[in-house]
Amino acid sequence: MTKIIGIGETIMDLVFKNNTIEKIVPGGSVFNALVSLARSNENVLFVSETGNDIIGEKIIKFMAENNMNTEFITRYEETPTPLSLAFLNEKNDAEYVFYKQQPQNIDYLPLPTINPHDILLYGSFYTINSKTRPRVTSLIEEAKKKNILRYYDPNFRSSHLKELPDLLPKIIETMKNSSIVRGSDEDFRLIFSSNEDLDALYEKTIKHISPYFICTCAENGVFLFSPNLKKHFPTPKIQPISTIGAGDNFNAGFIFAYSQMLKKNKNLKIKDLTEKEWEKLIHSGINFSKEVCLSLNNYIDKK
């Protein structure tokens, strides 16, 4: 049975609008995607950690209520579970303030076993953080040996720009070891310090690192770049309630559609996808993303 393994941070999001707390929900980029996938009846497994405190307990309970495997969630004692304050602006885009303190020592649980038809999802700063990177790269290496889909979302924030000279080699190495890379146009302009149009950026730089590349550009649509196909997909015109989780749920929608294809064809590989199959994957990502933007949730509704 195909399982979707995600590795990333776990955090509690406090969502503000007009200086009022609108919602308090568990979050984290990979976490958000996995909740939506679990709600879509996919078999998901999350590798992460939380503090051994009341917030961590609420997150663990939330995961269990959403049929998410909690076996590989490490609980630590030294520091509290991280918090994220998300302030929605007039466009309902979020500006973030993070309160987190990495414990000095964590006695991590063992990593899960990867099987030949699984899918691996990873991304954000967690992937390139010196403390958590060894665990992420161990999973990526094992996934590469099994030749499964390795899906990377850099989700790079401007708050890390000062660290970019040290982080860039890690980002590039991760991109090279991934089957597909998906991020926003802002992500890649920050990472590569570029104002070039996407086609030029792909041809000049990205295709030599990661030939299968998806760039989501909010109302300007989604751009797919691959060795055999380049295509633009328009996105529906909506009035978003919140864009928190939009990219995370594009990832969820893409992986959901890929998992459905994989159940029909166990030998499916990214390099063999037809144009119609790419269209199904991208449209599924857009649909999941749209659903989330029309609510204050970080993930698709249970209904």
Image (cartoon, helix red, strand yellow):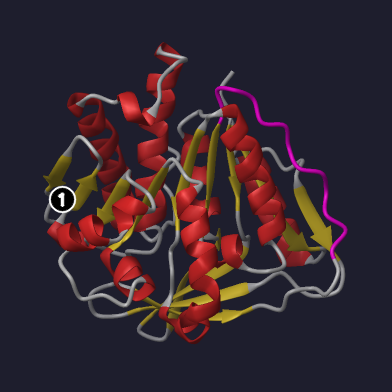
Disc tally is 1
Q: Nearest the camera: 206 or 255?
A: 206
Reply above or below: 157 against 293: below
* The C terminus - image quarter: top left
Where does residue 179 sit, x and y in percent of width and height?
44, 40
Residue 67 showing in the rendered view = no
Q: Nearest the camera: 63 or 266?
A: 266
Where does residue 64 sit, x and y in percent of width and height?
68, 41
Where does residue 245 sit, x and y in percent of width and height?
40, 58
Magenta stretch containing residue 248, yes or no? no
> Which contiguous range is marked in magenta?
106-118
Taking 216 as reference, is 142 left or right? right
Reply above or below: 11 against 267: below
Magenta stretch containing residue 116, yes or no? yes
Q: Amino acid at mark 1?
A: Thr
Where does residue 25 sit, x and y in percent of width and height?
54, 61
Q: Label 1 belongs to which residue?
A: 235
